[in-house]
Amino acid sequence: MDTLATYEQSFGGVRRRFILLPDHLAVRGRRFGSTFDARYDLASLSAQFDSARILAPLFHGGVVLIAIALLGAIILVFNSGLIWPALAVVGMIAFSGIACVIFRRRPLQVFVFKLKGGNYAFEVIGAGPEAVRVEQFVSSVAEQIGKEHGETRVSPSTSRVVA
């Protein structure tokens, strides 16, 4: 069978390669040393998909680290005075938080495909080496699902920004 489109995503320790074929979508991946394969028949999928822009968990973790560092600095300054070793630790926590926020400041695009019955099937995240191609790949998948169902035009069902 001829491959119609491919997309590779890398996010959160998981690397997935999506391979679009005329009648199904194959997903091959690697997660923390183990591998997995999945297959989705296009006939069982809905051509409508949900779309969202989300901030990565690493961003939120960075904000929490910054808040913890600020709280720690306030407690140290007002209750114990300036204890330099403790302030150095609080500074390292703050630096880690700032690094996390800077590293993941840009929202990720997420596209969720569903089964015909409405249940979640899989998501495609715009992260990794081919992130700029995610919309093109998702459009190709939706178009191929539409062809499988005899439909002509497909668009996302919802689009939202999640902070």
Image (spheres, rainbow, N blue to C red):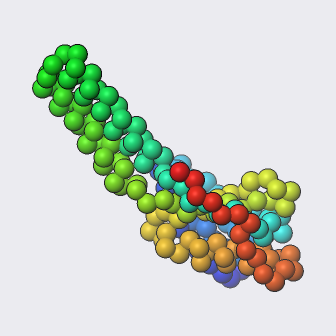
Q: Is residue 92 above or below residue 101?
A: above
At a point 49% along the width and 73% down the height, the residue shown is 132
Q: Work out which residue is located at the far front of the displayed protein and give it.
A: 78
> In the figure, residue 72 lies in which quadrant?
top left
Residue 41: percent from the left, percent from the top? 78, 66
Query: For residue 117, what is the image quadrant?
Result: bottom right
The residue located at (59%, 73%) in the rendering is: 135
Residue 62 shown left or right of residue 84 in the figure:
right
Q: Position of residue 82 (x, y in %)?
A: 13, 23
Q: Is residue 22 visible?
A: no
Left/right placement of residue 98 relative to residue 34 reads left
Residue 146 % position (x, y): 80, 77
The residue at the point 58 percent across, 58 percent down is: 161
Q: Which residue is pictured at 48% across the width and 46% down the height?
A: 57
Instruction: State the quadrant of the N terminus.
Output: bottom right
Q: Is residue 101 left or right of residue 48?
A: left
Residue 148: give x, y in percent of width and height: 83, 77
Count of number-bearing discs:
0
Q: Quadrant of residue 26?
A: bottom right
Q: Is residue 98 above or below residue 46?
A: above
Q: Residue furthest top?
A: 79
108 relative position to 143: left or right: left
The front one of 150 and 72 is 72
The answer to whether 98 is drawn above or below residue 122 in the figure is above
Q: Residue 147 versus residue 100: which sits nearer the camera?
A: 100
For residue 19, say whether it is visible.
Answer: yes
